Image: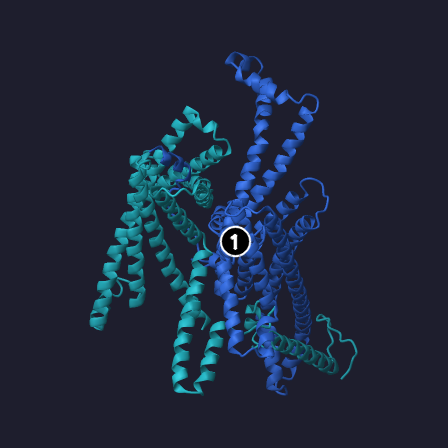
Chain colours: A cyan, B blue
Amino acid sequence: MTSDPVNTNISSPTLTDRNADESWELLKREFNTLFSNLKTDSKEEGNFTDNKGVIAKKPIVLQDNDDSDFTQNQGKVATATSTTSDRSFKRTLGSIEMKKRYVKKNCQAKFVFNTLEGKEVCSKILQHTLGLLSLLLLTRKIRLLNFSSKLRLVIQQLSLFRYYLRFGNFAINLYKIIKRFRWLREMKKLHYKDQSILFYFKNFRFFDIIEAFYNLTDELILFHKLQSMFGKKNTSHANTNRLMTFVKEQHYILWEVLNILAINKNIEQWRQLIRDEIYLSIYNTSGNAIKEYELKYKLPTNDKVNLELRKNNITLDFYKIILNLLSNLINIKGKRDKYNSELAYEIISVGSGVTELLKLWNRAKVTSANEHTSAV
Amino acid sequence: MSQFGTTDIVSGSETPPYSGASYQDAQDDNTHPHSSDAGAEKFSAGSGSESHTESSRSDDEDSQAKTKMVDNITILKYILDSLSGRDKLAKIIKYALDILKLFIEKSKRNLTVLDPSVLTYYTKILKNLTVKVALRHPITVIKVLLLSLLRNFDKKIDFISQQLSTFRYILRFGGTPFRVCSFLGKFNKTRKCNFQIDQIKKIWFNEASLREFLDLYYGIFDELDLLYKLKIWTNKSFYSFVSRQESLAWQYDILLSLKDHWLNLQSLQKRQLELEVQLKVQNNALLLSPILMHQAHKDDGSQSPIRKQLLNDLNVNNDAEVLIHKQLKAIKDEKTLVYLDIARLSFDCMANTSDILNLKTPKGTYAVLSLGSGLTGLVKLWITTKRSLCSSKD
């Protein structure tokens, strides 16, 4: 072993045996250092060895001491109690199952609530439930002026909150439409010079344009609401009112059109689902027969549970759209100033919100199940 | 019945057709102080670590990620469809409006210092404005128009700012029941283990429990604050207590997060240094290897198989070096995020300190600091969103 510096100049013309041995020794030492480093890393970072790919995958995060999972702990409790008596074991198992279910539901609720859609749906349900409550208070002639004004304020803020949640989509829609238009213009210049203006109409999705207009009216209504909240005196201006009435009418009509388009899509989904169900039943009855169709027809889900879940979602979607169409009809007809219509509107809206919440719940169930599977 | 006419203002339209609201939001606990940065923080932390992990996946995936381009508008849409993104944007708009309001107030004060009725006078002029006058003196008319707008503009800005504040409060609202559930779970665990001191220590005396407690503490006061704003309760003395506790809870949370990020930064720097040393060692070894290879060719028969293998690995396989470079890049990216987080938390800390200690700061200090916090938060969110979109398969 020598500590002399080694000549590492590779262009050196003369290489003696001694030099080569020294280089070899140095290289060995370098390797030892390298491997010892890797070993230290693996010891520090936990449970993997000198697999470099794994080292790279490991995110550098500070681990907390609390490594006890709630569900895991429940499992431990079950094992501990199992040694005492069978009866208590059964009872504990039951309670464990219940608690697991409770934790799972809690997670799902958190999942739903911590999304934009979830927040929107929850605020919708709350808003219309409170609206229903305020209407019922009016009929009962309960003199709770203070309470009613508080309710109105909360309803108003929830309504505004939902508008804020939707705000900003118009700009994005418009940008996308302009981008598409530019692209089409370029395409027309390059390849389709003879095409007429119909070329543009064919290449734009009707849904996108309607959605853009809907978002525009939605944002205009928000501005109007803010303005009317800021100074109620100005709202009585005839021109503004006329304009806003027009904008609102358009808003309701566009929403109705969007719902009709959504129902069209829903029907398509139904058809696909029925096809999948038939395919699955054939698949289950005879495995050989399906081989002929394997290339032609591809089943997106080969699981019956998934199919059931999809069926549930599509059904819920269908109900939601129908309820939306119904409630919006009241708006289009302008019957909201009548008590019964208003009551019906609130009830239908709550129903629509609940169906949407159920749909989100199902989705959360799938997501949490997937997460659980990947974790396992 | 005219009584329903008043409900017109509250007639929210139905649920819009969301296109991109993802369950990634569900990963983040949108329950943070004024800035609700925990949401963003957790969102970005998740994405950040994800990107860190992603960076070292298989080569195929990596090359796919590299080739995938994400449009800015797609990122914006993604941010708008997330709770933390909405919150960040609302925060930025709110504090930008607050700063604008200060400017307007200042210019208004300069105008009215000599004649307090100047704005009213200009408004009167505008009422008698005809096309003829407008055509004759267009610039004067524009000036008068702007001045008359200033009259209400600051009030309007103030109103919108308040509305945005309420929006952010509602956005954070509702997290407390989940936190209470989590706490109840811990209580149950403590009960189950018969209050053994070791178990109690393990369950309660750790950083996660402290953070959970602070989240709950903050969440309760934050939600009480919103209820006061919605006039559900109206006790002013209790409100001052609530608002004080809310600020304190937020400060504790900021300090804890700052500590976490600081430690994270230290560990990242340490790791970076280690990798750089490894790389240097490897490079030196590679420089040495041709000499040894030359020797090896000379006396091929006398070499041990291990030596042959080592030399072969050195010359043929450069994967280790590529891997280290990848890791270094991932660490640098992660460090950028941590720096952004530290900057954001520092802004928040400064703003909140002025609030807690009732420091006499120049007007607009809080708004400027909060705007800084919002912008750094948005930058971080933008980066993490871009990364997650780039690395996503679809």
Residue B371 versus residue A238: which sits nearer the camera? A238
Q: In this picture, is B380 found above or below A38?
A: above
Nearest the viewer among A37 and A16 is A37
Residue A84 visible? yes
Q: In the drawing, does residue B291 fall left or right of residue A315?
A: right
Q: Quadrant of the N terminus of chain B?
A: top left
Q: How crowded is mark 1: few (under 14 residues within 10 Å), some or many (20 or more)?
A: many
Q: Tell whether A291 sits left or right of A160.
A: left
Between A78 and B126, the residue placed more toward the observer is A78
In this rendered view, identify the residue nearer to me: A371 or B349.
Answer: B349
How many marks on residues?
1
Say which residue appears at 24% left-offset and 66% top-offset.
Answer: A280
Residue B354 location in percent, x, y?
69, 48
Q: Where is residue B201 in the image (x, y as percent from the top left)?
A: 61, 75
Q: How far from the left and from the top, in percent, is residue A172? A: 45, 42
Whether residue A61 can be seen here:
no
Residue lying farthest to the right in this orientation: A4
| Image location (x, y in percent) of residue A274 | 23, 59
Q: Which quarter of the picture shows residue B211?
A: bottom right
Classify A336 as above or below A363. Answer: above
Amino acid type assigned to the residue bearing label 1 in the image: Lys
Task: Look at the numbered disc 1 and give the secondary structure of its residue.
Answer: helix
Residue B188 appears left or right of A347: right
Instruction: List the residue tagged with mark 1.
Output: B386
Chain of the residue under the numbered disc 1 shown in the image: B
Residue A245 lies in what quarter of the image? top left
Q: Quadrant location of the C terminus of chain B? A: bottom left
